[in-house]
Image: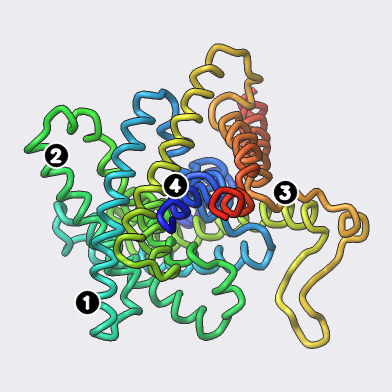
Amino acid sequence: MATERMQVLTKGFFKENPVFIIMLGLCPTLGVTTQVINGIGMGLSVIFVLVFSNIFISMLKNIIPNSVRIPSYIVIIAAFVTIVEMVMHAFAPSIYKALGIFLPLIVVNCIILGRAEAFANKNTVLDSFLDGVGMGVGFTMALTLIAFIREVFGAGTITLVPMGGFDGVIEIPLFYTYPVRVLTLAAGALLLMGYLKAFFEWNANRKRG
Amino acid sequence: MAYVAIFITYIFINNFILTQFLGLCPFIGVSKNSESAIGMGMAVTFVMGIASIITWLVYNLLLLPLDLAYLQTLSFILVIAALVQFVEMIIQKNSPALYQALGIFLPLITTNCAVLGIAIMNITEGYNLMESFSAGIAAGIGFTLALVLMSNIRERMDLHPVRKAFKGVPIAFISGGLMALAFMAFDKALLTNLLG
């Protein structure tokens, strides 16, 4: 039982990673990953919305009539997205500004509706919670990886949270002087995503033998 | 002149797919052949135009007077979901031919970020009703343009040998990246050169 639970939690990390394997939620993945902190901020927002919408939907799965389930899910998701928007606006205005339109667009992030439909509406509350955490963490890891590559090579910096005397920006010596600018642009994001996806395909093929 | 500027901006300069990353899922998912790409593009353009009008009206006549602007996201997605359903019903009833062409794409449009994206953008840009409608149609045309170009590239690519790991989605992303590079030629300078 315990190992099954663990699997529900960890399958989102690598085996069914929402970004690289299931290919869901691509718009924010490429749209916000110009800086590491934005990737993490987006990831945390999605974890919050995904976990709570999964919990609520699995709690209400016997109450919501089947024919109106999709609109009901969207309303539940939109409510949590609005909460995230308001909290971020109040406590992290710089990230709120950087994420811009992609914050309200979490509503139509296919990962969240996808998990509601594929998992939360037929599993227990605890399993849905674990699934939400796992998928959310997998999403965050993918975003952080993409943002890390784009920022280090494209701008020569790593932007994190400013704390005390540390302004939150780490400069990488060589790339700061000679950045590969294209990676910070839209074109670079698409190219990088293509190469990363090819790497994961290659890796999967290699394992299959 | 303002409308020409809106059209050029949303079709070329701020192309929804290639520079804003809105609507990437259909860009990768529905671009395998050009027929379905055109169908999807037309359906999205249609819904974006109508959604722009309705969400503008909802925001300015309902949410603002009632001081409920924070319900923007929630009400917009509900309006769009209802609208898509409604459009589907009307088309099915009145034009079976059009329904045949667009029908299967309509349900997918509710969760297309491009539609909610343009609705929110119209509000943040402060457009009036007519400008919102133009922006919606123009963004839809830009979306269709990118989708159709992509589907033609992918149809060609089927005939060429591609390394196993790159087959399908990865090579589609890389072609999309190269297309985005080409679209970088369109920038704000184009607008000033054209319209002065």
The C terminus of chain A - image quarter = top right
Label 1–label 4 contact, CB within 8 A:
no
Which percent across, then down, holds residue B189? 64, 52
Which percent across, then down, holds residue A176? 87, 59
Q: Residues within 10 Å of mark 2 (few under 14, many from 20)?
A: some
Q: Which residue is mark 3?
A: A183
The residue shown at (23%, 58%) is A71
The residue shown at (59%, 54%) is B192
Question: Label 2 to label 3, Cα distance in Å?
Answer: 43 Å
Query: Mark 2 is on which residue type?
Result: Ile
* Front disc: 2 or 3: 2
The residue shown at (17%, 61%) is A64
Question: Label 4 to label 2, Cα distance in Å?
Answer: 23 Å
Label 3, secondary structure: give it.
Answer: helix
Residue closer to the observer: B130 or B153: B130
- N-term-proximal mark, 4 vs 2: 4
Give the label on residue B23, or none. 4
User: Does residue A101 appear in the picture of this structure?
Assistant: yes
> Both on one chain, marks 4 and 2?
yes
Q: Which residue is mark 1?
A: B62
Label 2–label 3 contact, CB within 8 A:
no
Position of residue B65 in the picture relative to residue A5 (left or right):
left
Label 4, secondary structure: give it.
Answer: loop
- Single out the residue that lies furthest toward the front: B196
